[in-house]
Image: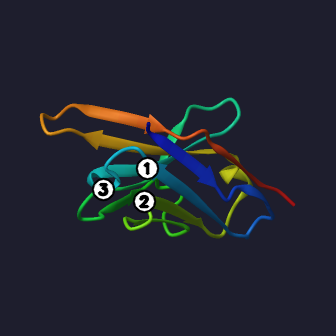
Amino acid sequence: QVQLVESGGGLVQPGGSLRLSCAASGFHFSSSAMSWYRQAPGKERELVAVITSAGGTTNYADSVKGRFTISSDNAKNTVYLQMNSLKPEDTAVYYCNALRTDWVGRKYSYWGQGTQDTVSS
């Protein structure tokens, strides 16, 4: 059974930091691309950061470049999102996503339950 369990969200003041974790189980973590998405009230869900399998290449939304860092620990089957210099507009529910490709090229997407991050003074 596939599970993605996020943790680390909460309330932080502008300029502060949060570190999100996503613990994965039930699929081959190290061969999957892992991503963080977010959805603010009244807005579409958007991609924040992605780290590819194997090579660990990372990509970020322009709005978070230089402030957020995605990383993964294959030994712990966990992906992280370090968020620094947080702004009120970073307030959203953050979701972990895993994209697995099987040996014939079929893709499977899995989602966590989300964790609320609020940036406010």
Local crowd size for mark 2, using a 10 Å CA cut-off: few (<14), some (14–19), many (≥20): some
Report which residue position mark 1 lands on: 35
Disc number placed over residue 52 in the picture, else none: 3
Question: Mark 2 and mark 3: span between their CA atoms?
Answer: 14 Å
Q: Nearer the viewer, mark 1 or mark 2?
A: 2
Local crowd size for mark 3, using a 10 Å CA cut-off: few (<14), some (14–19), many (≥20): some
Residue at 53%, 59% (x, y): give it: 64
**Count of labels in the image:** 3
Image position, residue 32 (x, y; %): 31, 49
Report which residue position mark 2 lands on: 77
Report the amino acid beneath label 2.
Asn
- In this figure, which colouring scheme has been used for the structure? rainbow
Report the amino acid beneath label 1.
Ser
View extreme (right): residue? 121
Q: Relative to 40, is 107 on the left or the right?
A: left
Image position, residue 19 (x, y; %): 62, 65
Give yes or no for contact between labels 1 and 2 (Cβ–Cβ under 8 Å).
Answer: no
Near-viewer residue (75 or 14): 75
Question: Mark 1 and mark 3: span between their CA atoms?
Answer: 8 Å
Report the amino acid beneath label 3.
Thr
Classify mark 1: helix, strand or loop: strand
Residue at 53%, 54% (x, y): give it: 22
Comes first in the chain, label 2 or label 3: 3
Classify mark 3: helix, strand or loop: loop
Q: Relative to 120, is 83 on the left or the right?
A: left
Q: Nearer the viewer, mark 2 or mark 3?
A: 2
Image position, residue 101 (x, y; %): 23, 40
View extreme (left): residue? 104
Question: Mark 1 and mark 2: span between their CA atoms?
Answer: 13 Å
The C terminus is located in which quarter?
A: bottom right
The N terminus is located in which quarter?
A: top left
